[in-house]
Image (cartoon, coloured by chain):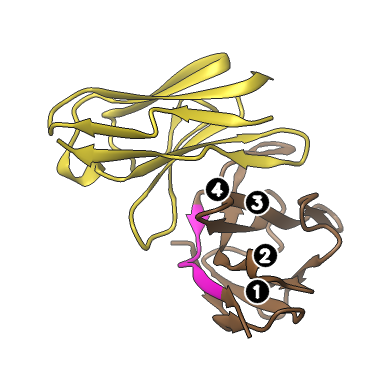
Chain colours: A yellow, B brown
Amino acid sequence: IQLTQSPSTLSAFVGDRVTITCRASQTIDGWLAWYQQKPGKAPNLLMYKASILESGVPSRFSGSGSGTEFTLSISSLQPDDFATYYCQHYNDLSWTFGQGTKVEIK
Amino acid sequence: QVQLQQSGPGLVKPSQTLSLTCAISGDSVSNNGATWNWIRQSPSRGLEWLARTYYRSKWNYDYAVSVKSRVTINPDTSKNQFSLHLNSVTPEDTAVYYCARDPAYSPGWTRNAFDIWGQGTMVTVSS
């Protein structure tokens, strides 16, 4: 199963609502996670099971979706949110990541 | 607070074995609910899961198809750590290598997501 994120790059203002999409090459179950990664750092888990917010992650982050399309939304973009975001899926002893979406300051 | 501390060389010669260790604090490699993983990241391959080990009455091991013939993951309960060994490396194995935990979610299931990561080790394969 391949995961394709869109857009690859997103330019936005502080305060904007942004949405990142992760599309799977076939219908997947709910084992979908989202990560934030900043340069030189390890990825940081934001959401798992598609819509469960990881402890300590701000509530402006939310996840949804089913079937082949899943989304990560940030309700009001903050300066600390400029980073690269990855989706990740588990299926049949294989953990697959999307190619990433870079969120830049406009 | 769970932390993972990686150690190992940053330069490996082609055809040799890449070996990295991940020391666990605040949790146990024998944790009956979690799994312990290695993941790498490179510009050409992106984020790629490589291997996992976990204890469920006995030790279990799973490997990515892409590296299965070359990779071994080993738990060390005496030191509360686990290691990655990747043999016959080529320049294509150049990447940042991470260890990571997949925690328990419900009985018999993990989250299938990685909540704690090591700091990363940049490994270059070059003569």
Mark 3 or 1: in front is 3
- Which sits earlier in the primary sequence, circle 2 or circle 4? 2
Residue nearest the observer in this picture, B66 or A73: B66
- Which sits earlier in the primary sequence, circle 2 or circle 1? 2
Residue B54 spot, x, y in % from top left: 75, 56
Q: Residue at x 59, y 47 (%)?
A: B103
Labelled disc at residue B29 = 2
Q: Chain of mark 1?
A: B
Give the secondary structure at mark 3: strand
- Which sits earlier in the primary sequence, circle 3 or circle 1? 3
Q: Residue at x 50, y 59 (%)?
A: B117
Give the residues drawn in magenta, as a range: B116-123
Residue matched to label 1: B80
Q: Residues within 10 Å of mark 4 (few under 14, many from 20)?
A: many
Residue nearest the observer in this picture, A84 or A52: A84
Mark 2 or 4: in front is 4
Residue B34 lies within the magenta run: no
Labelled disc at residue B49 = 3
Q: Residue at x 43, y 62 (%)?
A: B1
For the residues labelled 2 and 3, the Cα–Cα distance comes to: 18 Å
Residue matched to label 4: B114
Quick check: can you spot residue A29?
Answer: no
